Image: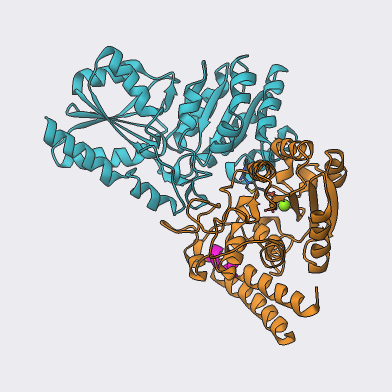
Chain colours: A orange, B cyan
């Protein structure tokens, strides 16, 4: 991708992060940490990778995205709003009574959400089902699913991985947001999921490791996945939980806590400064 | 009057476990990456060597707890009610209940008062699915003092127990000096012969406020607190049915399979009276602040009061 294109993606990702902060602040709850670590991945998927039409969100031939780590929906909602699926203002009503944007993704009520999720480990299986249906119907759409590194402790993730490889689902791509943290501590101290790449390899996956905040690396990873035949791919993305809000970065306490007024202003200030910087380069 | 303590029952649970463990070496506590939320974190701080964080793997956690129990430990395994009883249902059924192992399962953030997280995390089925397992004891304590005693009773009972924990802080109403927790026994909190309200868990406090307000309006409603949903106190229910002729149940749970159904089971076979169930009417919840949701779903003093008043005025 050329530098102008990359700059556009960086701007969109910054706005997605702002949306996560606006949403969780107004909700007085929610999950900023993992929303910030995943923002670049959502941005790349919806602006560069996926074949989707926001004016026709249920289009049968669209590529699909399943947010298996459903709690990280605030920045996904922001990306969907930027893409035109619904109004940006919906973010200020996140998690309120009657809101379109639920605390965890609800495919019945939110345009652009392809699968309801929130119970960890379940989204990956549904993504496998969508990929299998695509194969059965000779469709060319692809399916993407984002997992947390803590989520990889769920047995169901590995049942799904085994299934995807066994059924030769080369139209599915797992992405693991490896931000190193879960709720009660680091993934290393609680889960013991490493070596993650070797595990996926042993399960029959094409394994690609990238920096999940680097759009060039994301591009070559998704290209690699698309061109791999006969087996599923997994992109193991190393990321920073709380990325781009200084006091949230790498802090386990920001997993599921909303910013208060003062923290909100600092966070927005930092993101606005970053946005200005990026826009000046356009 | 006893000191009113404003605490979520999950916190009372964590504190009670910690206290009990000081004198009982066989207690071990398991969690699935939610120790901060279920409040087993309180125990972890004090007894790190007896705390096992199983990671986000609830099915395995229950299986491990079964093994620990089979080897002589007394494990308490906690997660959100949704994941503890939902994800690990079959492990509970086949690895804990069938072999009658001494595992205590704690499900926190139960009911719709989970709040903003929304439907995927608001468990309104746990009482139904735990009740349906042969031999499972099901506890749903209503305030701080009751939770502390329930944890002790669960420990002393030899066999599987499910304990429901709430997220929302609530005022205590029991008086610890006169309070006695007896497994399987309901507690009459307010006397009356016009009608009986039977409530459980988080909504007992609201029910108590409702019957007191009704008294001022000349309606004498009996209030029974059912902290043990299984085995249920048949005697207290039948007596209430005979003496008051009319029952209203209140629970923060689906009206299918919970307290209301348990009460109907008892009265239909021994003393059929009309039962009106206040609960979640077989629909999923949604995101919102806990207190606001409780009001919308009618699990608040004003609605309980209104339902009871309407029945007494129109039927009697
Ligand atoms: C089955 C299940 N168990 C527990 C939870 C509660 N929970 C929500 S997020 C989370 C930690 C997730 O960590 P990770 O997958 O690393 O996500 P991230 O760091 O990207 O936020 C847990 C335990 C859940 N949502 N689902
Ligand atoms: Mg993580």
Residue bounds of the magenta highlight: A19-25
Q: Residue at x 43, y 24 (%)?
A: B228
Is B59 inside the magenta-drawn segment? no
Q: Residue at x 70, y 62 (%)?
A: A45
Residue B111 percent coordinates (x, y): 45, 40
Residue B135 seen: yes
Name the side, left or right, on which A128 lies relative to B237: right
Q: Is residue A27 above or below residue B282?
A: below
The x, y position of residue A98, in whole percent, is 41, 57
Q: Is residue B79 left or right of residue B142?
A: right
Which quadrant of the view contains residue B70? top right
Q: Position of residue B227 (x, y in %)?
A: 42, 28
Say how many tags the image has: 0
Front residue of A195/A30: it is: A195
Identify the residue shown where x is 64% and y is 79%: A272
- Does residue A73 sit above or below B55 in this rendering? below
Pick the front one: A103 or B29: A103
Residue A23 image position (x, y, % from top left): 54, 65
């Amino acid at each position: 991708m050329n530098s102008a294109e990359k700059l556009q993606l960086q701007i969109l990702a910054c706005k997605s992060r702002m949306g996560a902060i606006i949403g969780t602040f107004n909700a007085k709850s929610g999950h900023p940490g993992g929303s910030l670590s995943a923002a670049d991945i959502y941005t790349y998927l919806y602006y560069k990778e996926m074949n989707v039409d926001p004016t026709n969100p249920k289009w049968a031939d669209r590529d699909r995205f399943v947010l298996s780590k459903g709690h990280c929906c605030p920045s996904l909602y922001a990306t969907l709003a930027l893409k035109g699926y619904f109004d940006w203002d919906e973010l200020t009503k996140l998690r309120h009574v009657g809101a379109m944007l639920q605390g965890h993704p609800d495919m019945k009520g939110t345009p652009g959400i392809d699968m309801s999720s929130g119970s960890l480990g379940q989204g990956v299986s549904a993504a496998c089902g969508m990929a299998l249906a695509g194969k059965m119907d000779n469709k060319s759409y692809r399916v993407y699913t984002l997992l947390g590194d803590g989520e990889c402790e769920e047995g169901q993730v590995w049942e799904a991985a085994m299934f995807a490889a066994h059924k030769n689902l080369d139209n599915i791509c797992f992405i693991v947001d490896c931000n190193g943290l879960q709720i009660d501590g680091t993934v290393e101290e609680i889960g013991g999921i490493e070596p993650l790449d070797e595990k996926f390899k042993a399960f029959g996956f094409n394994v690609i490791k990238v920096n999940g905040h680097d759009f060039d690396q994301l591009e070559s990873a998704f290209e690699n996945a698309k061109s791999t035949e006969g087996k599923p791919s997994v992109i193991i993305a190393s990321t920073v939980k709380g990325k781009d809000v200084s006091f949230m970065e790498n802090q386990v306490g920001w997993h599921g806590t909303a910013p208060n007024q003062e923290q909100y202003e600092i966070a927005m200030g930092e993101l606005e400064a970053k946005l200005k910087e990026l826009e000046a380069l356009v | 009057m006893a000191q009113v303590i404003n605490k979520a029952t999950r916190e009372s649970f964590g504190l009670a476990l910690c206290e009990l463990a000081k004198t009982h070496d066989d207690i071990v506590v398991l969690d699935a990456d939610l120790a901060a939320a279920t409040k087993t974190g309180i125990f972890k701080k004090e007894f790190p060597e007896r705390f096992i964080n199983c990671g986000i793997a609830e099915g395995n956690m229950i299986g491990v707890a079964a093994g620990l129990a089979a080897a002589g430990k007394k494990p308490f395994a906690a997660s959100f009610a949704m994941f503890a009883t939902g994800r690990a249902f079959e492990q509970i059924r086949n690895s804990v209940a069938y072999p009658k192992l001494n595992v205590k399962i704690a499900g926190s953030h139960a009911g719709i008062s989970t709040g903003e997280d929304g439907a995927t995390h608001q468990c309104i089925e746990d009482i139904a699915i735990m009740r349906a397992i042969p031999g499972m004891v099901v506890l749903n304590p209503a305030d701080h003092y009751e939770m502390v005693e329930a944890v002790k009773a669960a420990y002393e009972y030899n066999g599987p127990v499910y304990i429901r924990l709430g997220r929302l802080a609530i005022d205590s109403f029991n008086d610890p000096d006169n309070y006695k927790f007896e497994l399987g026994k309901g507690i009459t909190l307010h006397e009356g012969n016009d009608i009986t309200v039977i409530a459980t868990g988080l909504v007992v406090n609201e029910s108590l406020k409702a019957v007191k307000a009704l008294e001022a309006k000349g309606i004498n409603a009996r209030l029974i607190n059912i902290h043990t949903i299984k085995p249920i106190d048949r005697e207290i229910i039948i007596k209430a049915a005979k003496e008051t002729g009319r029952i209203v149940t209140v629970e923060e749970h689906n009206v299918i399979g919970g307290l209301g159904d348990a009460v109907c089971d008892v009265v239909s076979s021994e003393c059929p009276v009309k039962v009106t169930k206040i609960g979640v009417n077989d629909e999923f919840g949604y995101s919102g602040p806990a207190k606001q949701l409780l009001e919308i779903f009618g699990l608040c003093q004003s609605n309980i009061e209104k339902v009871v008043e309407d029945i007494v005025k129109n039927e009697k």
